[in-house]
Image (cartoon, grey):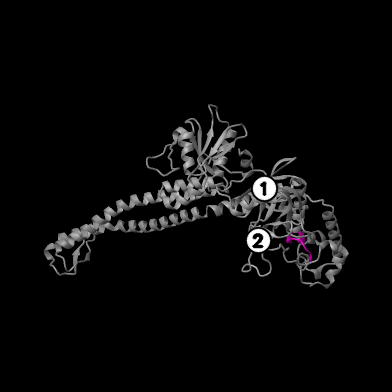
Amino acid sequence: MPLDAICLGAVAHELNENLCGCRVEKVYQPDREEVILQTRGQGGAKRLLLSIAAGAPRAHLIESARENPAAPPMFCMLLRKHVQGAKIASISQPVLERMMEIELDTTDEMGIPCKKYLVCELMGKHSNLILRDGEGRIIDALRRVDGDISGKRQVLPGLFYRLPPAQDKINPFSISGAGLAAALGTADEEQGIDRFLLNHLLGFSPLLCRELAFRACGEVAKPIGQMSAEEQHRLGAVYDDFCTYVQEKRFRPFLLTKNEDASVFDFSFLPLTQYEHLMSITQMNSFSALLAAFFEKKGKAERMAKRSQDLHKTVVNARDRLARKLAIQQKELEQTHNREQYKRLGDLITANLYQLEKGMNKVKVIDYYDESCPEIEISLDVKMTPQQNAQRYFKLYTKAKTAEEVLSVQIERGRADLDYLESVLAALSEAEGERDLAQLREELTQTGILSSKQTRNKKAQMKPVAAKPFHYRTSDGFDVFAGKNNLQNDILTLRTAFKTDIWFHTQKIHGSHVILVVDGREPTNQAMTEAAMIAAYHSKARTSSMVPVDFTPVRQVKKPAGAKPGMVIYHVYQTAYITPNETQIEKLRVE
């Protein structure tokens, strides 16, 4: 669901209780659309995430630090100048607006105490983060809006800040349930109850409107004309109960997950009944925990997709180009399979030289290679002698034979390269930060997919590469490591792991090299199972069931001379079939 005005009010209330009186220690901007305020107060250090991403605008506390760019963006530098060191006086929400205002006590350039305000407008694609002074003038905004973008409301430094245009809707707390039920008499009878509520009540999301309709009528979109008097009365009672629930601030964070696959589906500030048995409802400890559970994983994937877009495009283009080349080579190889026919025609011409003369364009001869000895016609070049025509067919035979040998080698090499590029695409999906992408760029440069010129500017902007593999610890205490890319796979398997450690990899499926560190102990069945599950999860088959995972001692794994990064061979192994469980695997993760 979108973070509607009422739910945002609950979030703002919780953040105010947690952060009021805290001081802003640091300001970070890990992404173009995200700002993090690191604060410290009586409760210790806390990180407030402010995101204006169009698909997921939100504000909540986060636990872990984000990876930051080497050079902070301009807006981040401006916030550090004006906000760093300021004390949070309050966090509030303008009445039923999808906005949150952070009031800050700070000082100006002369050291005189003053007020500044960080305004978070969380309105879908129109979301913005605006810093204004105590007089209401805009200092700057994360997204500047000039007259070319909007003729109604500009957001530019120096202008006075104005609230977004008001919606032509009713304040839901200014009308009673009885008044709402009476208003149904003048509404379009074909219109659904949920649509009626959405069109008339300020701050209500479609999810909330459907919930009120379901509680009143047992349907989410029942036409108003089909409502009975009892249902209209019940809608008024449900509405009054809801308003009381909100006004008394009895908000509770609820996360909805699908029963079929346990994936997150939605969230709310009240228990939802409209999905009945299709969803599981879990009450979270806080709204920050709720929003993190709903948005963080999806948001992380989207951020990495944006950051890796250039790499992904380069690898996909190289893969597609190679696939087209292989298709052409395969077609040429198939054509060489008829080369024996050329030798046969050359032999037949040689056997019939006595009846041939220069200038003939064709000849009919007996085909002695066929048991029935049919008469066949052979094309000749009129400019050549009979002997030269025979040699022409022998040369075509030799050329086709040589082509088969060369094409076979090229196709085998091309398929290995194609397989490697597929493994790089799989590694891109495993990248968790800029350091992982930097290591992938280094790998692609080493293998010639990227030129050093393409990576020169990237290297100048990045911190030194210090990417680490995934680290897990099994339920019974064994360490498990999984490579994020082919370079890490090589380091793990060929340099880091001991010969007695156990190596895991999905069978004929691209994925990470996974090492179960035995450290002189006998690995338990539990540790082996969980390591195999990790290998299945960090592969292209992570959403599949009964994934085949090969495992063998590290000493059985070899790297052929000249092989691409991550490519190894093994002959002695066993295979386990396992279904990866994301929730279980995340519990084993070591940060």
Q: Residue furthest front?
A: 110
Q: Is residue 206 magenta?
A: yes
Q: Is residue 393 left or right of residue 526?
A: left
Residues 435 and 504: in front is: 435
Residue 544: x %, y % from top left: 57, 48
Residue 263: x %, y % from top left: 65, 50
Q: According to the image, label 1 marks what residue?
A: 84
Residues 435 and 142: in front is: 142
Q: According to the image, label 2 marks what residue?
A: 157
Q: CA distance from mark 2 to mark 1?
A: 19 Å
Q: Residue furthest top?
A: 520
Q: Could you tell me which residue is drawn at 39 percent across and 40 percent down?
A: 560
The quadrant holding residue 519 is: top right
Circle 2: element type: loop
Circle 1: element type: loop
Q: Is residue 400 magenta?
A: no
Amino acid found under the numbered disc labelled 1: Gln
Q: Residue furthest left?
A: 354
**Boundaries of the magenta span:** 200-209
- Quick check: can you spot residue 261? no
* Image quadrant occupied by the C terminus: top right
- Quick check: can you spot residue 141? yes
Few, some or many residues within 10 Å of mark 2 (<14, 14–19, 20+): some
Amino acid found under the numbered disc labelled 2: Pro
Residue 476: x %, y % from top left: 62, 32
The quadrant holding residue 321 is: bottom left
Residue 326: x %, y % from top left: 39, 55
Few, some or many residues within 10 Å of mark 1 (<14, 14–19, 20+): some
Please give the label number shown on residue 12: none
* Image quadrant occupied by the N terminus: bottom right
Q: Could you tell me which residue is drawn at 71 percent across and 45 percent down?
A: 23
Please tell me which of labels 2 and 1 falls first in the chain: 1
